[in-house]
Image: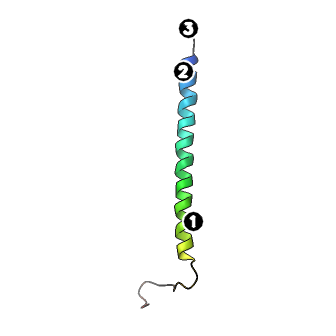
Amino acid sequence: MTHLPYIIAAYGLTLGVAIVLSVNAALRLRRARARLATIERPGRAARTPGRPA
């Protein structure tokens, strides 16, 4: 009896989870950078809640 199918499945699952987490982190980083660029755009007036613009 060989343990090869179990070993391949374990490595495949680990690789799959690592890929999903990496892609998710990359997408979140891209969105965060886009939001930061919008916030830091020059000429944009800073608004404070409760204060008229």
As displayed, is residue 48 above or below residue 22?
A: below
Amino acid type, label 2: Tyr
Quadrant location of the C terminus in the rendered image? bottom left
Residue position for label 3:
1
Which quadrant, please, contains the N terminus?
A: top right
- Return the mark for residue 48: none
Q: CA distance from mark 3 to mark 2?
A: 11 Å
- For the residue carrying disc 1, how many other residues have a C-alpha within 10 Å: few (<14), some (14-19), or many (20+)? few
Q: Residue furthest toward the top?
A: 1
- For label 1, the residue is 33
Q: Nearer the viewer, mark 1 or mark 2?
A: 1
Tell me how the rendering is colored: rainbow
Separation of marks 3 and 1 at Cα, in angstroms: 52 Å
The residues bearing labels 1 and 2 have C-alpha atoms spaced at a distance of: 41 Å
Q: Is residue 22 above or below residue 4?
A: below
Q: Secondary structure at mark 2?
A: helix
Return the disc, 3 or 2, that comes first in the chain's sequence. 3
Identify residue for label 2.
6
Q: Residues within 10 Å of mark 2 (few under 14, many from 20)?
A: few
Q: Secondary structure at mark 3?
A: loop
The amino acid beneath tag 3 is: Met
Instruction: Please tell me whether residue 16 is drawn above or below residue 25 in the rendered image.
Output: above
N-term mark: 1 or 2:
2
Query: For the residue labelled by badge 1, is the local secondary structure a helix, a strand or a loop?
Result: helix
Q: Amino acid at mark 1?
A: Arg
Residue pictured at 56% horizontal, 85% vertical? 43
Q: Residues within 10 Å of mark 3 (few under 14, many from 20)?
A: few
Q: Residue at x 53, y 75 (%)?
A: 39
At which x and y percent is residue 31? 52, 62
Q: In the rendering, at what x and y percent does residue 27 appear?
A: 53, 55
